[in-house]
Amino acid sequence: MTRRFEGKVVAITGGTDGIGLVTARSFAAEGAQVYVTGRRPEKLDQAVAEIGHGAVGVQGDVGVPEDLDRLYARLRQDHGRLDVVFANAGISESAALGAIDEAHVDRLFATNLKGTIHTVQKALPLMTAGGAVVLAGSVAGSTGIGALSIYSATKAAIRSFARTWTTDLKSRGIRVNVVSPGMVQTPAMQAYLENNAGAEDAFKQMIPFGRLGSSDEIAAAVLFLASDAASFVAGHELFVDGGVMAV
């Protein structure tokens, strides 16, 4: 295995399961010192053990700015710098137009929008030239999936963040990109499929590759965007969706 991130310091929010956990494990296997966050202490401990390689867990919710302050205080204390941020934490909820209430909007905006803003903004004092920020988007930000208008709007905003933050940070040499998964086999997706008969077959019909993606495939895209191989890639949205958005 290559060691593209030997000596690099990486922070991943929402790193206790699914794409976040697999990505953290991939960074660690390639030499990075990985810090992950999660809301539930027991799951965070399990994730840190699974990641191995000296990974560090900092309990917290990205929707609570003070929790992010604790993450970055720990990073400052341990290393004094940060090379890569994967702003991965996010939530998805459904509500069709006519059934959208304020609590639904507030929950999604607090985590997906405000959480992403604070994750990146609070990291900046620790980041140096050559650093990389990868934001977690979704094909939902570019499509019109029913009952997902608020979630989709948050992901469309994240796509916009990558453009504007690339401009904001160009003088500092910090790259910002988005990885946007399609239908991926994660614990959350598995729970959805188990409760919605026929959904998996319907998804496979939508995907040119005829299958769901894996978290490892998304992690590979994140690591590419964070690596020196993507040194001239900025403000870009990389769809990892089996061809859904391209075909």
Image (tube, helix red, strand yellow):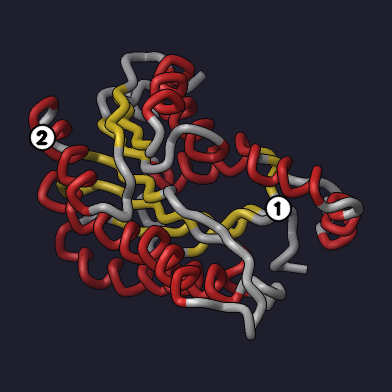
User: Looking at the image, which is closer to me, 140 or 112?
Assistant: 112
Residue at left offset 81%, top offset 58%:
207
The amino acid pointed to by label 1 is: Met
Q: Which residue is mark 1?
A: 183
The answer to whether one can see residue 30 in this image is no
The amino acid pointed to by label 2 is: Arg
At label 1, counting other C-alpha atoms closer than 10 Å, the crowd grade (few under 14, some 14-19, many 20 or more) is many
Please state if 136 lies on the left or on the right of 184 as rendered. left
Q: Position of residue 136 (x, y in %)?
A: 47, 54
Residue at left offset 30%, top offset 40%:
60
Please state if 81 lies on the left or on the right of 195 as rendered. left
| Vertical comparison of 93 with 128: above or below | below
Q: Which residue is mark 2?
A: 76
Residue at left offset 56%, top offset 58%:
92
Q: CA distance from mark 1 to mark 2?
A: 36 Å
Based on the displayed image, in which of its 4 quarters is residue 80 positioned? Answer: top left
Q: Earlier in the sequence, mark 1 or mark 2?
A: 2
The answer to whether one can see residue 153 in this image is yes
Q: How many marks?
A: 2
